[in-house]
Each structure stands twice: as C-alpha cells, then as structure tokens.
Image (cartoon, rainbow, N blue to C red):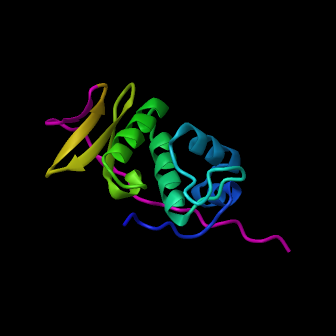
C-alpha cells in the first residue's frame, strides 16, 4: 500500500513554510520538482510531505545546484520508488568553484548525479548534508 499524504495546503501556505513565494511553489509543481499530492488541478493542494520536498528543493537551489540537476535527481529518485523521493534520500552537496555537485548516499558510499545517472564517487570535497528545514509562518496581523 502506498504511503498516505497528510494535510491540505495551498501554494501560498507551502511557500510561507519553505521561504519562497506561492507562485514559485506552483512553478516547481508544474515543472516536476515537487508534487501536489492532494490535488493536481488548480488550485493545487499540497500535503505536509510535499512541503518537506519543497524545502529540500529550496535548499538545493540555494546551495547552487542547477535546476536541471535538481529536476534530473527528482525524476531518477522518483523512478526508483516512493512518492517523496527527496525526503527519503540522504543527499549532500559539494561546493566547487564553478558549480555545486549533488550527491546521494547509498550502499555505504556516495554517488554523484552525472549525465549517465548516479555514479560512485571516490574523492570528495567538504560534504554539506541536506537537512529538512521549515520556516516559521509569519505571525497573523492584528
């Protein structure tokens, strides 16, 4: 039985928790970075699990991982199983001069996402593991 999604949030609420705009959340869903698992039709509705995925996408982009790399990672991880692939994966980044490398920990070692998919990495720089972080929503106005 597939895992069940929890909650029902609009894009603006998801954006407030993640630290981006609701418009950005909608764009990420349309482009396949995240899902709107509660309702794909407009207005999209997101689960708490979708919020966690969006938080990880935001962290990766903030670290300098390129959008096509994030999209490829999500697609490959989703194909391997599980509706929320980013929260189920142990991910890290390595910042370099011109780009940021995306790594996945699997079978006791680190893999890097390249043009041919995930490939074992032997030499690594300073790893920065991706952790789930949500922002506190803004206080209600009086």
Classify residue 94 by image quadrant. Answer: top left
Please give left or right for residue 31 compared with residue 117 in the image.
right
Question: What is the total number of numbered labels drawn onto the structure image?
Answer: 0
**In the image, what residue occupies the spot 86% across and 74% down?**
142
Please give left or right for residue 22 compared with residue 78 in the image.
right
**In the image, what residue occupies the spot 65% across and 63% down?**
9
Residue found farthest to the bottom: 142
Residue 62 placement (x, y as % from top left)? 50, 42
Residue 45 placement (x, y as % from top left)? 64, 58
126 vs 71, nearest the viewer = 71
121 vs 81, nearest the viewer = 81
Residue 48 placement (x, y as % from top left)? 54, 65
Task: Indicate whether 99 appears above or below 18.
Answer: above
Residue 56 placement (x, y as % from top left)? 46, 51
The chief SS type of the magenta part is loop
Q: Is residue 129 magenta?
A: yes
Classify residue 10 by image quadrant. Answer: bottom right
């Amino acid at each position: 039985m597939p895992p069940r999604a929890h909650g029902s949030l609009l894009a603006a609420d998801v954006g407030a928790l993640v630290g981006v705009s609701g418009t950005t959340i909608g764009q990420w869903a349309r482009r396949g970075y995240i899902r709107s698992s509660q309702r794909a039709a407009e207005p999209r509705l997101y689960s708490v699990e979708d919020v966690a995925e969006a938080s990880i996408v935001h962290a990766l982009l903030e670290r300098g991982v390129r959008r096509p790399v994030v999209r490829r990672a999500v697609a490959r991880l989703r194909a391997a199983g599980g509706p929320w692939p980013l929260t189920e994966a142990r991910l890290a980044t390595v910042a370099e001069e011109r780009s940021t490398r995306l790594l996945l920990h699997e079978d006791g070692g680190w893999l890097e996402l390249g043009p041919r998919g995930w490939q074992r990495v032997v030499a690594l720089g300073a790893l920065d593991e991706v952790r789930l972080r949500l922002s506190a929503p803004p206080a209600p106005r009086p």
